[in-house]
């Protein structure tokens, strides 16, 4: 298993735009596998590479009963129709808020072998693709909320048990320091 730790809100990697994939190599295929296993383990409906600390334009998705999928270097065409529904994010554990998104999306990109692929989705799949593509631009779902929802979400984040320890903690050395501060 290659389940990776999921980065939480507050970790700067989540605000850093990811780079396009140029090499469709074994390392990329391992990244897709890690993302898929981490997403299924969470479990989540989608996961973007920056959420496991990798700054590449790759995400995976797993919606309804379909096989898990992935998309690399996505570009999106959004429907004009909108849809508001509850949305969560693995980088904000326990938080779910209504977010307005395009109802449908046509996403073009590549699979891990470098073949061009197109994914057409509506409702949950469309929402997932928009949410994950946002991650690749350093955009988070709180940015898509109206100001009232965002205020409520920020309050809940500050009260969340995980907040304030977003970056993996370096363990304090158990060794004696001879009374010296290090
Ligand atoms: Zn997310």
Image (cartoon, rainbow, N blue to C red):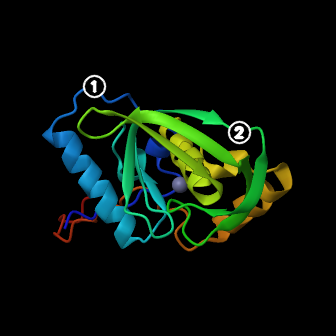
110 w.r.t. 124: above or below: above
| Residue 135 seen from this side | yes
Of residue 46 and residue 167, the one placed in the foreground of this image is 46
Describe residue 85's horizontal placement relative to residue 36 as left or right. Answer: right
Residue at position x 53%, y 52% in the image: 10
Farthest right residue?
A: 148
Residue 138 in view, yes or no: no
> Within 10 angstroms of label 1, few (less than 14), some, or many (20 or more) residues?
few
Q: Position of residue 104 (x, y in %)?
A: 66, 46
Extreme residue toward the top, this view = 22
Q: Residues within 10 Å of mark 2 (few under 14, many from 20)?
A: some
Q: Earlier in the sequence, mark 1 or mark 2?
A: 1
Viewer-nearest residue: 146 or 33: 33
Q: Quadrant of residue 27?
A: top left
- The structure residue drawn at horizontal position 51% and vertical position 59%, both measured from the top left corner, is 91
Q: Is residue 21 left or right of residue 174?
A: right
Residue at the location (56% across, 34% down)?
Answer: 76
Q: Which residue is mark 2?
A: 79
Quarter that holds the N terminus:
bottom left
Q: Quadrant of the C terminus?
A: bottom left
**SS for callout 2:** loop
Identify which residue is drawn at 22% across, 28% down.
23
Assign a secondary structure to mark 1.
Answer: loop
Q: Is residue 171 above or below residue 142?
A: below
Left or right, 102 with reference to 116: right
Image disc number at residue 22: 1
Number of the front mark, 1 or 2: 2
How far apart marks 1 and 2 lie (CA) works out to 29 Å
- Where's residue 70, x and y in %? 37, 48
């Amino acid at each position: 298993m290659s389940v990776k730790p999921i980065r939480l809100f507050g970790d700067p990697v989540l605000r850093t735009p990811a780079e396009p994939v140029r090499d469709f190599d074994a390392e990329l295929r391992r990244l897709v596998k890690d993302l898929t296993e981490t997403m299924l383990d969470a479990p989540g409906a989608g996961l973007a590479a920056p959420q496991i600390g990798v700054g590449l334009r790759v995400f995976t998705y797993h919606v309804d009963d379909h096989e898990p999928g992935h998309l690399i270097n996505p570009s999106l065409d959004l429907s004009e129709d909108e849809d508001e529904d509850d949305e969560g994010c693995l980088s904000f554990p326990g938080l779910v808020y209504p977010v307005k998104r395009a109802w449908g999306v046509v996403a073009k990109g590549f699979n891990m072998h470098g073949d061009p692929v197109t994914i057409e989705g509506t409702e949950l799949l469309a929402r997932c693709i928009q949410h994950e593509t946002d991650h690749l631009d350093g955009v988070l779902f709180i940015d898509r909320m109206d100001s009232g929802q965002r205020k409520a979400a920020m309050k809940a984040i500050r009260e969340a048990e995980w907040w304030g320890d977003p970056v993996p903690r370096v363990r304090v050395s158990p060794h004696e320091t001879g009374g010296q501060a290090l």
